[in-house]
Image (cartoon, rainbow, N blue to C red):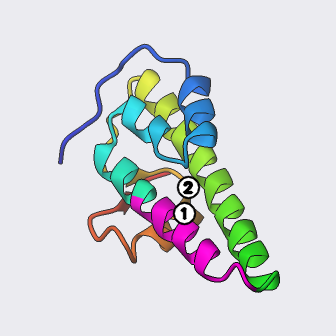
Amino acid sequence: MATLEKKNLSPILPVLANLCCLSFLGYLLIGQTKKALVFLVIAVIWVVLAFVTSPTFVLPFLFGLLYLALVIMAAIDVHAVATAVEAGEEVDENEYKLEMLHKIMVTVQKDAIYRS
């Protein structure tokens, strides 16, 4: 279990980075590199699926809505993790603070843990 180090970042900065860069840059900023790579791979796969299904209108729209929900959950999670790290709590590099996101991501990232 590797814990994250306090980096004196405002929790808003990782949230903005996540919202701007496919939900992975904020995790890189706070030190959760494995989560960042998982979200980057998911984003690439999602974009490929959207292009493959582009002849239809409904499927890319649904993929977009699902991805938007994932982006919002990741932004909430990265804010909670960054806030906990800056408050001096011991946070694991594979830890999720949003239970719903953890339940989704544990299927992809087997060593994901949840602590509120």
The residue lying at 17 percent from left, 48 percent from top is 1
Closer to the camera in the image, 82 or 66: 66
- For label 2, the residue is 98
Q: Which amino acid type corresponds to the residue marked 2 in the rendered image?
A: Leu
Label 2 neighbour load within 10 Å: few <14, some 14-19, many 20+: many
The residue lying at 34 percent from left, 42 percent from top is 32
Alpha carbon separation for disc pair 1 and 2: 6 Å
Q: Which amino acid type corresponds to the residue marked 1 in the rendered image?
A: Leu
At mark 1, the secondary structure is: helix
Label 1 neighbour load within 10 Å: few <14, some 14-19, many 20+: some
Q: How many marks?
A: 2
User: The magenta stretch spans which residues?
Assistant: 41-55
Left/right placement of residue 111 relative to residue 88 reads left
The residue lying at 57 percent from left, 24 percent from top is 13
Left/right placement of residue 91 relative to residue 50 reads left
| Secondary structure mostly seen in the magenta stretch | helix
- For label 1, the residue is 101
Dots 1 and 2: beta carbons under 8 Å? yes
- Kindly tell me whether residue 78 is visible in this rendering: yes
- Kindly tell me whether residue 114 is visible in this rendering: no
Give the image location of residue 99, x and y in percent: 54, 62
